[in-house]
Amino acid sequence: MTLLTKRDHSEKELKQKLSRAKKWDSPKERLYSDKEIAEVIAWAKEYQWIKEGAYLSERWAETLNRKKKGIYYINSYLNQKGLPEIKKDQEIEIEKALGLLKLKSRSQELTLDVKSKLTRFLKSRGFDNETIQMSFKLFQDQKKK
């Protein structure tokens, strides 16, 4: 119950946390059996302590969008939590990537070396190739103006 009062957890995440809990006096023994964990999760679902997967996916996606993470990063994160993936919104993805490009390359000339570094940076943030190419094109068009 304490876990659920701090923040929302998915069913998979709650199972993992409860199964990892160990006893104080003998750290090799688990604190909860599989049967107890299943009962707790059933109880939490019945009393709506565990939210729907789509709702949690949207909340996590909003949080990660504010941190300017790409769709691949977001869906990978949701998959780890046992939540359904979200759909890609190309406009938002390009907007985030363009903002990161502006932030990272303030006064630098876009040489091949700088462009490859920025591409690797955007890939590490979870953006796909199409989004990266489109954001570079928009970025260069804006610099020309």
Image (spheres, rainbow, N blue to C red):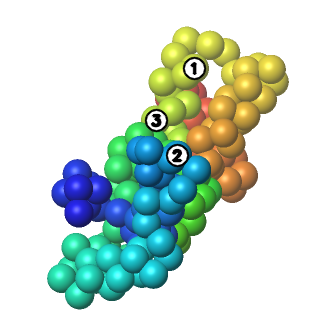
80 relative position to 25: left or right: right
Q: Which callout, 2 or 3, points at the residue further toward the start of the chain?
A: 2
Question: Which residue is rendered at x = 68% and y = 42% of the image?
Answer: 123
Q: How many marks?
A: 3
Separation of marks 1 and 3 at Cα, in angstroms: 10 Å
Circle number at residue 141: none
Q: Secondary structure at mark 2?
A: loop
Q: Position of residue 78 (x, y in %)?
A: 51, 63
**Image check: 48 left or right of 13?**
left
The answer to the question of whether label 2 and label 1 lie on touching residues, with beta carbons closer than 8 A, is no
> Of helix, strand and loop, which one carries label 1?
loop
Residue nearer the viewer, 145 or 128 = 128
Image x and y of residue 128, in percent:
67, 54
Residue of label 2: 27
Disc number placed over residue 99 in the picture, else none: 3
Question: How busy is the neighbourhood of tag 1: few (under 14 within 10 Å), some, or many (20 plus)?
Answer: few
- Of the residues shown, which amino acid type is indicated by label 3? Gly
Q: First in sequence: mark 1 or mark 3? A: 3
Asked whether the residues under the numbered discs 1 and 3 touch, taking CB atoms below 8 Å apart as contact, a structural biologist would say no
- Which mark's residue is nearer the viewer, 2 or 3? 2
The amino acid sitting under disc 1 is Ser
Mark 2 touches mark 3? (CB < 8 Å)? no
Q: Residues within 10 Å of mark 3 (few under 14, many from 20)?
A: some
Q: How far from the left and from the top, in percent, is residue 101?
A: 55, 31
The residue at the point 38 percent across, 58 percent down is 60
Of marks 2 and 1, the one in the foreground:
2
Mark nearer the N terminus (2 vs 1): 2
Measured Cα–Cα span from mark 2 to mark 3: 48 Å
Q: Which residue is mark 1?
A: 105
Residue 47: image quadrant is: bottom left
Q: Considering only vertical position in the picture, is 63 above or below 139? A: below
